[in-house]
Amino acid sequence: MFSVIVRRIFSMIPTLLGLSLVVFLIVKAIPGDPAQLLLGDKANAQSLKALRTELGLDSPIFVQYGKFVYRTFIEGDLGRSIASSEPIWDIIKVKFPATVELAIFATFLAILIGIPLGILAADRKGSWLDSLAISTSIFGVSIPVFWLGLILIWIFGLNLGVLPMSGRMDIIFDYEPITGMVLIDSLLQSDLELWWSSFTHIILPGVTLSTIPLAFIARITRASMLEVLKEDYVRTARAKGLSKIKVVMKHALKSALPNIVTIVGLQLGALLAGAMITETVYSWPGIGTWILSSVHARDIPALEAGILLVALTYMIINLFVDIVLMIVDPRVRIT
Amino acid sequence: MTFGLLKLNFSSRLFLGLMVAAICLPPVVLAETLIFGRGGDSVGLDPARVTDGESFNVTDHIFENLVTFVPGTTDVTAGVASNWEISANGLTYTFTLRDGIKFHDGTPLNAEAVVFSFERQLNEKHPAYAFGAPYIYFKALGLDTLIKSVAAAAPNKVVFTLTKPEAPFLSSLGMQAFAIVSPTAVNKYKEDFARNPVGSGPYVFKTWVKNQKVVLEANADYWGEKAKIQKLVFRSIPDNNTRLMEMMGQKIHVMDNPAPDDIKTLKEKMGKSIQFAQRPGLNVAYLALNNKKKPFDNVLVRQAIHYAINKKAIIASVYAGNAEPAKNPMPPTLWGYNDDVKTYDYNPVKAKELLKQAGYRDGFKVTLWAMPIPRPYMLDPRKVAEAIQGDLAAVGIKAQIVSYEWGTYLDKTQKGEHDMALMGWTGDIGDPDNFLYVLLDKDNAKVPAQNISFYENDKLHTILMEAKKTTDQKKRITLYKQAQAIIAIDSPMIPLAHSLDIVPMLTTVKHFVIDPTGRRQFSRVTLE
């Protein structure tokens, strides 16, 4: 198993290089000149030319790509943002943990509710519970996120006043990041007030973001369980007189698990790419809003780094899913 | 129970009372903190490098300029320079600095620091040039070609030499981008000065959590009137609806960029706990008439159109009342505004009469260009165009509405392809030159034109050039009033509206003065 993992890690390098070319070309293909955007309506030919030279936009495209690859992969330097002149690594260090924290929280919620819901629905196929699970999942995927977000803020933040409406923590806190994930850092710093503040702040965006993965997880769990519950060995287990819980949890769920793990991994990957709408509605300072604003500003170095980061995250999650699959499903280990 | 409590001494009761209060009350914001909820984060806090309002609103509290503006006006007044002299030929400006001002890091604010602040923007070979380049604002206002040199004549005297006389230069120096920065801090932080700003202003930079908040603290050693509020927090809440709800929930003290509908909602839901500061912004929305094309070469036709358009109705319907009707191409908040120009109150009968005199008894057909996107001075250009179309139809003019993608629109109007076109302008500096010369001087009627009315009037040109050169403020005011009178009679374009800048805030916020240039200044604000 170990050698498989090592091989997989090495195979990520050429993928990443190929990807860098694609990312570089896509970013270049976005219409709009960053120099023009920086200078605004008042740009003239002379100031444009000077700025383009300053930003290195006037050298041939393959030279630019060469510099980009050398800088990123050999020197490990992501460059500076055109818009803010900040080192991009510093931006990522702050924004990515915020996205990771929210994504993990949302996925955790989705698993916690989605899997039991799927199991119950499969077990009582055709019952009201099953209908409830199916309609919940349809509701989950089809409800517009910005609307749900605003409604939740309106109910719990404004009218009931029980949860904060936006942001990551109360403004009174001066927070020094360690991992960048406030829920963890506050515990490391044994600051329970900060923990509570960040926990209450993550609930609404977390719930909003969890609706789609929850729906997928519930559906996949239900479908896989239905398939498995029909199998002979489950019938045998039942015939042996095992308790229902034991049959479902031990025999059926174990076989359905690979499908569920795969979908959880995919969903987590998607959430880690940053949830632009949820992040915007809740003023959550994550990677999604950053990439979006970088597109608006044609912030080329920021975009290149941002998209590569998202892609790398996907690859790592995929690898992780495969490892988990190897653990839960012995058949995968052989291939 | 009650009896027992009474027996406690005062401090114990106070302590107990505070404990109870602490448990019962949700964590409210401290009275000495003001939270400003805004639509976006600052790009950077090096004022010379940025161009966006969200950055300037923060840097304006940290930094100071040689000159500044009287709060709530565009009148230039002393900043860190206590006074200044301008040579008779208008080419040399000598500023005398106040004694004893220090930056937040202890560096003295002297002539050397002023020269450093300008040289780093002016001179590409300056060692600190690269740290804040490309200095967009400096170049956009033409200071890179206007300033010939800047030098320290004495420890407290700075001399600017210009390449040509340009009176608006003084106003320009008051813009946030030309603030005086601590040379020590710039050299220490280099490119990262934008994240570690050090100035001499009433507030000291404390922390910046990206996309969350910028925190400033009152400068205890400030040389001037010290800030009343201890802590200023600039919170980023990009979603309009979320920001509105934060305001309704009183989680922020002041809200930026409310949508027209939000104002109504806030009034209805918050009643007495909300107040609004409002005034016309430094902007104008107008209908350009292409003076190079028939029939707009005829002044009677231009005046007829002016009478035909019902500005008040447009403001009531399309602007939801959040604008003031315009009669001049510059806003009334700007000095030199002429309130006594010829006016054109809505009068379709008079319009028809003028058209008849001009030989267009049966009207004519024209194109009416409408911007494709909302602009700060006109949120719904299409609807404005439709309203104008209706008004013109009533006097027999058939206008066909035309629109292009924004870049194309600018390009084509600058080339003069339109008959009539909606357009507008937001001032860069608080100087009438920045409106009248830019929008209506013949110098700017050449393709690509900013004077898209293509109005050329030699008399006006003489006045505007004279006003540019003279540094006598009273004379300049007189000249600009004359200029507006000429424009009003000639009616080369129809000034439509000055959109209002509206700032909702809790009624506990006192002494907030809304600024005509749109900056948000809290140094004099108090909280009740």
Image (spheres, coloured by chain):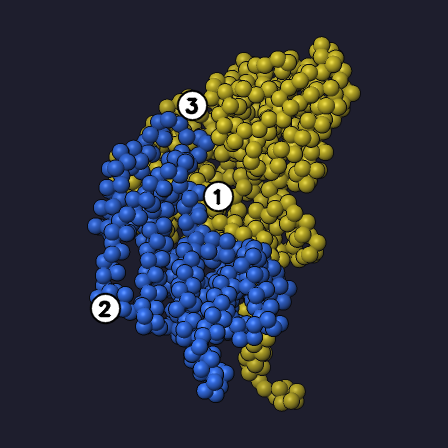
Local SS, label 3: loop
Q: Residues within 10 Å of mark 1 (few under 14, many from 20)?
A: some
Which residue is drawn at the image coordinates 70% and 20% (left, top)?
Answer: B397
Seen in the picture, residue B425 relative to B232 is either above or below; the reply is: above
Q: Which residue is mark 2?
A: A2
Q: Residues within 10 Å of mark 3 (few under 14, many from 20)?
A: some
Chain ID, mark 3: B
Label 1 or label 3, whichever lies nearer to me, is: 1
> Relative to B403, is B189 above or below?
below
Under mark 3, the amino acid is Pro
Q: Which residue is mark 1?
A: B53
Question: Where is mark 3, residue-wise?
Answer: B165
At mark 2, the secondary structure is: helix
Chain identifier for the yellow-coloured part of the image: B
Spot the blue chain and give its letter. Answer: A
Q: Is residue B89 in sight in this rendering?
A: yes
State the image coordinates of residue A319 (x, y, percent, origin top left). Answer: 31, 62
**Mark 2 and mark 1 residues within 8 Å of each other at the beta carbon:** no
